[in-house]
Amino acid sequence: MQDNSLTDNPIEQKFRDLGKRSEGVLVAYLMGHDPDPKSFLANAISLIEGGADILEVGIPFSDPVADGPIIQAAGMRALSARATPRQILDTIGELSTQFTLPIVTLTYYNPILAMGIERFMRTASDSGVNGMVVPDLPMEEAEAFRDMALKHNLDSIYLAAPNTSTERLQNIVNKSKGFLYLVSLYGVTGPRDILSTQSLDTVKKVKLLARGKIPISAGFGISRPEHVSSLLRAGADGVIVGSALVRVVAEHLDDPGEAQDHLKKNIWSLKQASKTTGC
Amino acid sequence: MEPLKTLADAYRSFSRDPSFKKELANWLEQYAGRPTPLYFAGQLTRHAHGAKIYLKREDLLHGGAHKINNTLGQALLAKKMGKRRIIAETGAGQHGVATAMACAALGLKAEIYMGSEDIERQKLNVFRMKMLGAKVHPVESGSKTLKDAINEALRDWVTNVEDTYYLLGSVVGPHPYPTMVRDFQSVIGKEARRQILRQEGKLPNAVVACVGGGSNSIGIFHSFLNDPEVNLYGVEAGGHDMSPGKHAAPLVAGREGVLHGMMTYVLQNAEGQIETTQSISAGLDYPAVGPEHSYLMGVGRTKYVTQTDSEALNAFKQLSQLEGIMPALEPAHAISYATKLAKTLKKEDSIIVNLSGRGDKDVDTIARQLPH
């Protein structure tokens, strides 16, 4: 069980604490139970020990339209290992008894609907989950979902894209809890070699609109320490790294120990970059 | 969300614009070949020994299927919106072909996503798309069929949203697609209702159409929704049998869910993972269905049934030999059900079947299945 009082919000607290030290929040994503529950648990622990500030756990869906090939393949591996939302939430429960970092889930709407929205949220909350990202549930359709999440002390984290209108962005800023998930490019998840100027401009634009009401975390396409420092310099409060980490898992399926070493090293160097924001 | 809003706004304003409507009507008449006949299938009627069977001949349209009604409408809209690159998904390849045709005619660039399994079973249509100047992207993810082609097209769209128009082929996906595609396809029902009143002097007892995503069926049903005496039957793919993964009948055997930005009936397992589907007709091989069908079933206005692969093959053979019309395997499901339904009705009753496409594309599949 997470050690947090009802009045406090562990995710926003994390951003506040690190913000005071001018340090960015590093959100590390892995697909739950990829490639199997035991390896996933060990991989997640490596990320936490290596310096991840928030852990984001994917719950696989057969048709992940927002994801590129790397996370699609991870979802397929997890599903082949018969991963279910309930089992992944159980594993998260194990992590949250050992570690205090905030944990968020990312899954599409249908697996949540199939489990029952309230039952999913209750189980998630009992397992120590602090927030949820549902990429195919737009804010406009999420009124009841958000109210129920509030009841279960779960932050509803909404996505914004480079083409999100100012009006809608304002709405997302007002209604997001925990952090705002800024998709900083046009496209699906997956590492890019170069961070586009568009990504940096998007961060600047959204930061201005957010006026400190909600922390901004930039995700999609981020794989290198220099991406992290550039985005933080542009004004992001945090960065989300997913495919670049999942790729490490995929490249070491035969040797899980090796995967854990690499994950720890990668997250450590990304974390170092988040400490030198230069502002 | 923004591109969907932009699209919904653009569609709302153009669909009320008399000059857009006139331009589209002109394309439908001069290029696609509308209106299509409502043909009295005398031999099939005698064989079925019951109600008169009429066929709405969408198979005679340019390209060989009803799909062109929608692609001309949306391609014209895309052009008005200033988009030059068009992407589309396709299952049987009919929507891909119809998109390639509309884009060629309107001077737009077309790229089509198609599951690699569908590419294998619909080679003729792949060739046609290429000849028409479209680029065909094979989709290797998931079940390598229609739903995966939609996933891939959506991924392309979010990546290239600034210059790209996503031309969805059925009454599925997020708003405004289900409404917009229905509107473009409702020309089928408008004509059929007028034609049956002229030819029979009264409304039919039933309208029967196959349902994959559900565009040809909603297109013909729509004009009859306010005629309570007309029974509306949607025929889903019963595939091999009704065990999970062996059919494609979400309305008959699915559960409420969310896929591709719509809440509707979906074939899924207990954990909400989308089931694979199976049907001899690639165009029906989809685990969800247009949300309006789910609504119409919920309020009791429409009924949904299934016909198996082998029933569809029999209907294909029957219609070919009795009427000299080779239907596509998709509407062969509707023909099969209508023949059975006719037997339960009186001789003075009539049934309209939407013959949504012709069977040339399916001859390889059929040659493998039927003795010849």
Image (spheres, coloured by chain):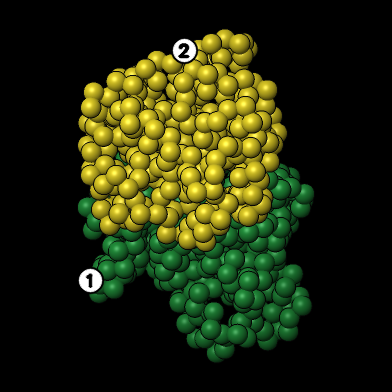
Chain colours: A yellow, B green
Query: Between residues B161 and B129, which one lies in front from this camera angle?
Result: B161
Position of the N terminus of chain A by quadrant: top right
Residue B302 x, y percent position in the rendering: 63, 73
Q: Amino acid at mark 1?
A: Ser
* Chain letter for the residue marked with disc 2 in the picture: A
Residue drawn 46% across the image and 12% down it: A265
Cα distance, mark 1 to mark 2? 63 Å
Say whether residue B241 is visible.
yes
Residue B85 x, y percent position in the rendering: 29, 44
The residue identified by callout 2 is: A265
Classify mark 1: residues with Cα within 10 Å, few (<14), some (14-19) or many (20+).
Answer: few
Residue drawn 37% across the image and 36% down it: A16
Residue drawn 29% across the image and 44% down it: A212
Residue B150 x, y percent position in the rendering: 48, 45
Q: State yes or no: discs 1 and 2 in contact (Cβ < 8 Å).
A: no
Position of the C terminus of chain A by quadrant: top left
